[in-house]
Image (cartoon, rainbow, N blue to C red):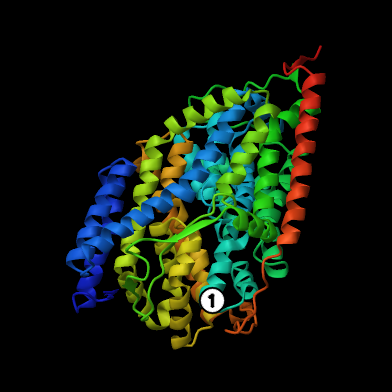
């Protein structure tokens, strides 16, 4: 017996929308007004959504329970797997004392908190988003800023907001790949259209971030550095997305922005170093210096991380790893048990890609890093156990959030909300980004939001005479500003910033900025649809008979051998440095 999804269960779309919005509105109320802990708000939201799914939408109890279980399991793997490994890697650098050297390096570039935030939260976070994605950038950069002495709330909030610019091209361009597969529009025109929207946000975002941190007047004091950071990032993002493709804009823009700002700061410094209120003055000790070898050793975990996540993003390596370590199964009782509104059965296949998962790449980087930073594997095991204890409540929160996301999607609640936005007529381009924003808020992933709504965006745009690439790209772009308030992202940032139980504060910190940026993207999309149509790329729709190449396993093995040699060389170099030089800093007379 198949259960059929419905969009208008009350036969009155206005009433159906009001009911469908209740679980979403509850999360806003619980976190902003009631100030609940994240896992409490998520569990209650699940209960509300389940009642609506069963009593209003007619979803069988068994399917509702299985849907929640499916989402919770996905929350544990691969999401929690990635978060645990990201925090574990950072904790290793702290336990070994190497993070003190990193802090010294950052202070040698600048002790100014405004500029440190740009380097780490904006530029380095964008680079990590391009390689790993799925929560790793926020987890790592928030932990780094807290380690540097940032207020945990500011560190986590800033990293969430900074993560908006690169999300569309995250994980080697996966969000755009999915949007292309679902909509039938080739990847390149979607990449080009997104690359003609987000660079505007990328120019604004650094100044916006610094204003949040220090206020408008203090932000103006570092305007030259802010412009270098934002303009360089926007240029590389535009260039790579329009002429190379969706896989590398974050990597290229992140690195380009880091290098541009570091070079600029060699020739320009702010008149006064800004720190947080009640924070001690900068204590950069010029009598302490570190050799190049010591600096290399301190940064080696993040070098290994970069190598691993880039390698894991290569399709030939993914193919090999999936051929060796992929277990998948049809979710019992749920697979093909729900019929979508388009008449197709919804497949529910759970994939445990335990080798190709990004979390596994970070685990390998961590295992390689343990001897490089001077720890024993016994000490590394103790750090891992402490990390699990540190993340026990965030793990519960993430599992609950994904359970909520799955029940609202499978029951049709999300489709009800989307249907109303899709029936706004000629104003639809303005509302198109809101669909992406809603999808990311619910699922925590721009990739998932594109899978949900790209087809709807395409069909609606065609019906009103707007080029579909505008609205499909708007789904991608609108989703990026939903990331900062997604309960899943909030839980990850809270875990990294040691704010477990304070998710409501973090949500209230980011929510207004999400709405402000969403409004900007809505206006840009509306203008692209009707005023600046010359910005729309020319393209042909993908052929349904498109032939896909088979996996190149031989090349994958070659890449893996090269990766192993590179990691061994890095490990040998670091260990050799460790034998030659003691890790205590040398004093300069």
Quarter in which the N terminus is drawn: bottom left
Q: Which residue is drawn at 45% across and 33% down?
A: 388
For label 1, the SS is helix
From the viewer's perspective, is residue 56 above or below residue 251?
A: below
Residue for badge 1: 470
From the viewer's perspective, is residue 219 above or below residue 286?
A: below
Rendering coords of residue 221 (x, y %): 62, 41
Q: Quadrant of residue 407?
A: bottom left
> Does the image show residue 214?
no
Q: Would residue 455 be found to the left or right of residue 260 on screen?
A: left
Q: In which quarter of the image is residue 452?
A: bottom left
Quarter in which the C terminus is drawn: top right
Q: Which of 205 and 561 is in front in this view?
A: 561
Q: Nearer the viewer, residue 360 or 14?
A: 360
Q: Which of 584 and 337 is in front in this view?
A: 337
Rendering coords of residue 115 (x, y %): 63, 39
Q: Residue at x 60, y 82 (%)?
A: 542
> Does the image show residue 25?
yes
């Amino acid at each position: 017996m198949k259960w059929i999804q419905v969009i208008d269960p009350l036969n009155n779309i206005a009433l159906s929308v009001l009911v469908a919005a209740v679980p979403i509105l509850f999360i806003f109320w619980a976190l902003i007004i009631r100030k609940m802990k994240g896992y409490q708000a998520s569990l209650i939201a699940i209960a509300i959504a389940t009642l609506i799914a069963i009593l209003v939408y007619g979803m069988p109890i068994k399917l509702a329970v299985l849907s929640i279980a499916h989402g919770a399991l996905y929350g544990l793997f691969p999401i929690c797997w990635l978060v645990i490994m990201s925090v574990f890697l950072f904790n290793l650098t702290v336990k070994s004392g190497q993070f003190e050297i990193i802090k010294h390096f950052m202070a040698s570039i600048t002790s100014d908190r405004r500029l440190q935030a740009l380097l780490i939260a904006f530029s380095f976070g964008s680079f990590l988003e391009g390689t790993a994605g799925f929560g790793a950038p926020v987890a790592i950069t928030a932990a780094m800023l807290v380690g540097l002495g940032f207020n945990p709330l500011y560190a986590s909030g800033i990293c969430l907001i900074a993560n908006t610019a690169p999300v569309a091209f995250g994980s080697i361009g996966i969000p755009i790949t999915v949007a292309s597969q679902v909509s039938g529009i080739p990847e390149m025109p979607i990449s080009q259209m997104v690359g003609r929207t987000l660079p505007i946000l990328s120019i604004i975002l650094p100044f916006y971030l610094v204003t949040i941190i220090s206020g408008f007047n203090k932000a103006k004091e570092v305007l030259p550095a802010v412009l270098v950071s934002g303009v360089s990032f926007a240029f590389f993002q535009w260039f790579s997305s329009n002429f190379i493709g969706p896989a590398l804009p974050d990597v290229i823009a992140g690195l380009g922005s880091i290098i541009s700002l570091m070079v600029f700061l060699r020739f320009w410094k702010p008149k006064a170093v800004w720190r947080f209120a009640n924070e001690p003055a900068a204590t950069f000790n010029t009598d302490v210096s570190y050799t190049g070898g010591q600096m290399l050793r301190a940064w080696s975990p993040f070098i290994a991380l970069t190598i691993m996540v880039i390698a894991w993003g290569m399709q030939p390596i993914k193919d090999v790893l999936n051929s060796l370590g992929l277990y998948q199964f049809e979710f019992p009782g749920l697979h093909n048990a729900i019929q979508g509104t388009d008449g197709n059965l919804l497949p529910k296949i759970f994939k445990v890609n335990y080798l190709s998962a990004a979390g596994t790449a970070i685990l390998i980087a961590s295992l390689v890093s343990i001897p490089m930073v001077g720890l024993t594997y016994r000490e590394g095991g103790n750090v891992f156990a402490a990390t699990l204890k540190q993340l026990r409540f965030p793990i519960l929160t993430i599992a609950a959030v994904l359970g909520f996301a799955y029940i609202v999607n499978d029951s049709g609640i999300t489709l009800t909300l989307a249907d109303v936005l899709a029936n706004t007529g000629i104003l639809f381009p303005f509302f198109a980004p809101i669909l992406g924003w809603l999808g990311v808020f619910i699922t925590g992933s721009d990739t998932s939001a594109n899978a949900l709504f790209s087809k709807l965006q395409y069909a609606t745009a065609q019906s009103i005479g707007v080029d579909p690439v505008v609205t499909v790209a708007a789904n991608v772009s609108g989703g990026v500003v939903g990331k900062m308030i997604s309960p899943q992202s909030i839980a990850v940032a809270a875990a990294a910033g040691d704010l477990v139980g304070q998710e409501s504060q973090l949500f209230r910190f980011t929510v207004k900025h999400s709405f402000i940026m969403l409004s900007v993207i809505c206006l840009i999309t509306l203008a692209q649809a009707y005023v600046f149509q010359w910005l729309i790329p020319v393209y042909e729709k993908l052929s349904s008979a498109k032939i896909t190449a088979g996996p190149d396993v031989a090349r994958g093995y070659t890449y893996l051998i090269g990766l192993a040699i590179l990691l061994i060389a890095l490990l040998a170099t670091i260990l050799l440095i460790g034998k030659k030089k003691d890790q205590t800093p040398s004093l300069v007379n």
